Image: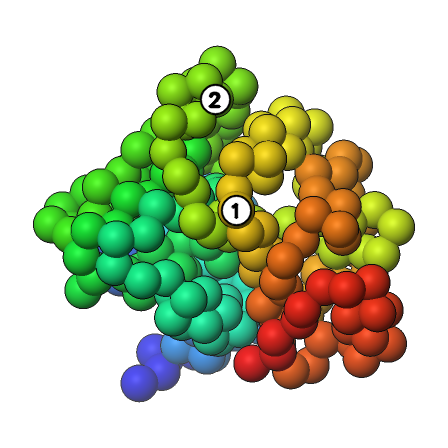
Amino acid sequence: MAVSRDLYLEERRQHILEQVQQDGRVSVTQLSELLGVSEVTIRNDLRALEGRGLLVRTHGGAVAANASVIDIALSRRRQRQIREKVDIGIAGANLIADGDAIFLDSSSTALAIAQQLKQRNRITVVSNSLAVAQDLLTVPGITVVMPGGRLHPDTVSLIGTDGLAFLKQFNIQMGFFGAHGIACQEGLTDISVDEANAKRSIVELCREVIAVVDATKWGQVGLASFAQLDEIDLVISNLDAPADLVAQVRAAGVKVVLI
C-alpha cells in the first residue's frame, strides 16, 4: 500500500528508516513505489540518511546501520541476478552426495549452494567464506572447515595460503568457484589478486573444479586468473548465457550445463 505523496522530506525519510528497521533491508525500487516518488529522490534520501549514520547504502538499496559486515556485503551481492543464483545453487547442490567433502568459495553463488544443503548429512564443507560458515553453523549434518588467513572485508572471506597444508588431509571431491568472469584465454578470473591466489591454491586440491557463474559473467575478464579452461571440469550457468561463448568453452573440452 502506497504512502501519501504529500509527505514532507523528513516525514518521508522517517518512513524509510521505519521500513529499514522493519525489514532489515530495502530496495530503491520498493521505496519509490511505496512513497510515490522517483528513484532519484529515494537515492538522495538514502545518501542523506547514510551521512547521518542511520543506515548503510548497498547496491540498489540500503540495510540497517547496525547490520553486520556480513549482512552489508551480502546485501550488495545478493541483489544481483537473484533468481539465477538460486537456480545455480540448486543445480550445484544436486551434484553433492551425503558423505562428500566439498569446497565453497566466498561468492554469493557458492552461498546459494550452501543454502540448499541444510537437509543433507555427513557433508564436510571447506570454505574461506564467513558467510557460508555462518549460514551452516547450526546445521547438524554439516561440518565446516576453514583454512584461516586474514579477513578480506569486501568478500567477507579469509585470504591466505597458510592453512593449505592443513587442507591437504582432506579428499575434496568438488570445488565450487564463482568468478568475476569466464573467458577462453583467461579462464576464471577475479578482480582481487589475493582472492585469485587463494582460489588458485584450492583449485589444485579439488578432484573436480566446478565454475558457478551466471550469464553476466561470460566474456568478462578480471585482474587475475585462478583456473584455466583445462583445469575446469564443469560450468553451471543460465540458459541466457551467450551461445557463442558457451560453444567456445565446450569446444575446449569443458562440460557446460545451462539451467
Looking at the image, which is closer to me, 18 or 80?
A: 80
Label 2 close to label 1 by CB (< 8 Å): no
Q: Nearer the viewer, residue 10 or 177?
A: 177
Residue appearing at x 52%, y 42% in the figure: 206
241 relative to 64 in the view: left or right? right
Q: Position of residue 167 (x, y in %)?
A: 41, 27
Secondary element at image label 1: strand
Image side of residue 58 versus residue 114, left or right? right
The amino acid pointed to by label 1 is Arg
Question: How many neighbours does mark 1 have within 10 angstroms: few (below 14), some (14-19), or many (20 or more)?
Answer: some
At x 66%, y 71%, the residue is: 256
| In the rendered image, the vertical position of residue 166 relative to residue 137, given as above or below | above
- The tag on residue 207 is 1
| Mark 2 lies on residue | 164
Q: Earlier in the sequence, mark 2 or mark 1?
A: 2
Residue 164: x and y, percent? 47, 22
